[in-house]
């Protein structure tokens, strides 16, 4: 394999110093008052030697990589078949294209927070946007180092943290109140991981809506990190739930598949509402009622905020919570028998 030309090779061929070559190839020749003749010699030498600048070395010199890192809780999330992740990445890429910066996906697995924080802040990217669990140690280390980091689709109580998220608590209430308005009283919830800030906030909204409606909390109706077996068992209880609120569209669609596999019809026997409002939910059969979080707006705002944090000016607004909306489709329906059994009471709309 032919050896790659270096900046020293270009300098020797043009008969100038390495600094002069650097100025010319980085577009700073005019500021350095380099003559046009020298510029021409350096340019021609670079062409003759097929010289390509070392991007990492250039980043160290300019202190800019013109790239943003995208970090999920685990690297393998990028390869999962998830409608939410797909739409997040599409939105991030579009925002970065418009901002004229590259996107770097952080996929290397590691169990050491310090090692991961070192990789993220070593100059390969100018800033990172992260989806991480509550009190994540990597995020804390980045804050301690003053490295530009923005949480998106999650939040932090740390006063230093910048984040862009959805109002997940209100979204949880909105989902449950929709089901209550249809007459459902036995409402289950499928939660995400215990450390997920978004899942926990949606659960608190679920609890709040039930309490406001005077419905006792049934712990048997709440599943965390749900499996096929657990959902199947839930739906075959003697007094099974008549409706499910799922913390994500992906798990909501899986719940519908499981319900259908054991002979339940959605929404006649079971109403299901998800959270995210993805395009996949719209195409699903039956189309999925969902709480839409503004995925594109959150991603775009996170990219913009991350770039602002790399600038010299101080950033005053660094916490954004965007409102969710209810999308009513065909996976939820009025449950007449529940109205006959229960004493109706007015249910708030949000």
Image (spheres, grey):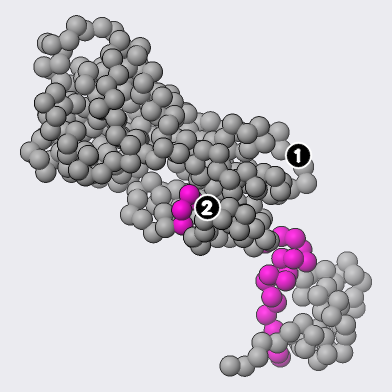
Quarter of the image holding residue 2? Answer: bottom right
What's the CA distance linking mark 1 and mark 2?
Answer: 24 Å
- For the point 27% across and 21% down, which residue is it? 218
The quadrant of the picture occupied by the N terminus is bottom right
Residue 257 spot, x, y in % from top left? 18, 43
Taking depth in this image into account, of 25 and 230 the one nearest to the observer is: 230
Q: Decide whether residue 218 is among the magenta residues.
A: no
Residue 23 spot, x, y in % from top left? 83, 73
Q: Earlier in the sequence, mark 1 or mark 2?
A: 2
Taking depth in this image into account, of 251 and 142 the one nearest to the observer is: 142
Quarter of the image holding residue 226? Answer: top left
From the viewer's perspective, tell me whether residue 220 is left or right of residue 122.
left
- For the point 75% across and 39% down, which residue is it? 314
- Could you tell me if residue 116 is visible in this image? yes
- For the point 87% across and 89% down, which residue is it? 15
From the viewer's perspective, tell me whether residue 260 is left or right of residue 315.
left
Residue 241 spot, x, y in % from top left? 19, 26
Mark 1 is surrounded, within 10 Å at the Cα level, by few (under 14), some (14 to 19) or many (20 or more) other residues, namely few
- For the point 31% across and 12% down, which residue is it? 213
Residue numbers of the magenta segment: 47-75
Q: Which residue is mark 2?
A: 71
Q: Which residue is mark 1?
A: 314
**Residue placed furthest toward the left:** 263
């Amino acid at each position: 394999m032919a050896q790659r030309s270096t900046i020293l090779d270009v300098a020797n061929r043009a008969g100038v110093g390495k600094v002069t070559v650097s100025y010319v190839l980085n577009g700073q020749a005019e500021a350095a008052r380099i003559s046009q003749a020298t510029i021409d010699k350096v340019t021609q030498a670079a062409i003759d030697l097929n010289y390509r600048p070392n991007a990492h070395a250039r980043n160290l010199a300019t202190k800019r990589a013109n790239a943003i890192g995208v970090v999920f809780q685990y690297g393998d999330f990028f390869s999962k078949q998830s409608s939410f992740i797909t739409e997040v990445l599409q939105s991030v890429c579009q925002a970065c294209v418009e901002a004229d910066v590259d996107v770097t996906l952080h996929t290397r697995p590691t169990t050491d927070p310090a090692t991961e924080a070192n990789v993220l802040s070593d100059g390969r990217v100018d800033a990172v946007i992260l989806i991480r669990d509550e009190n994540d140690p990597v995020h804390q280390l980045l804050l301690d180092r003053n490295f530009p980091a923005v949480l998106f689709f999650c939040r932090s109580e740390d006063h230093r943290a910048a984040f862009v998220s959805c109002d997940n608590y209100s979204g949880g209430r909105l989902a449950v109140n929709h089901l209550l308005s249809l007459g459902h009283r036995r409402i289950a919830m499928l939660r995400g991981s215990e450390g997920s800030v978004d899942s926990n906030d949606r659960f608190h909204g679920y609890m709040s809506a039930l309490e406001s409606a005077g419905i006792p909390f049934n712990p048997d109706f709440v599943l965390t990190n749900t499996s096929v077996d657990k959902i199947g068992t839930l739906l075959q209880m003697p007094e099974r739930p008549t409706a499910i609120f799922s913390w994500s569209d992906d798990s909501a669609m899986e719940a519908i598949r499981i319900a259908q596999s054991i002979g339940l019809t959605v929404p006649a026997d079971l109403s299901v509402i998800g959270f995210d409002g993805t395009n996949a939910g719209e195409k699903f059969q039956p189309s999925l009622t969902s709480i839409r979080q503004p995925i594109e707006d959150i991603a775009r705002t996170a990219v913009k905020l991350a770039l602002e944090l790399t600038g010299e000016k101080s950033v005053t607004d660094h916490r954004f919570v965007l409102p969710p909306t209810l999308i009513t489709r065909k996976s939820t329906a009025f449950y007449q028998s529940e109205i006959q059994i229960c004493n109706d009471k007015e249910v708030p709309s949000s």
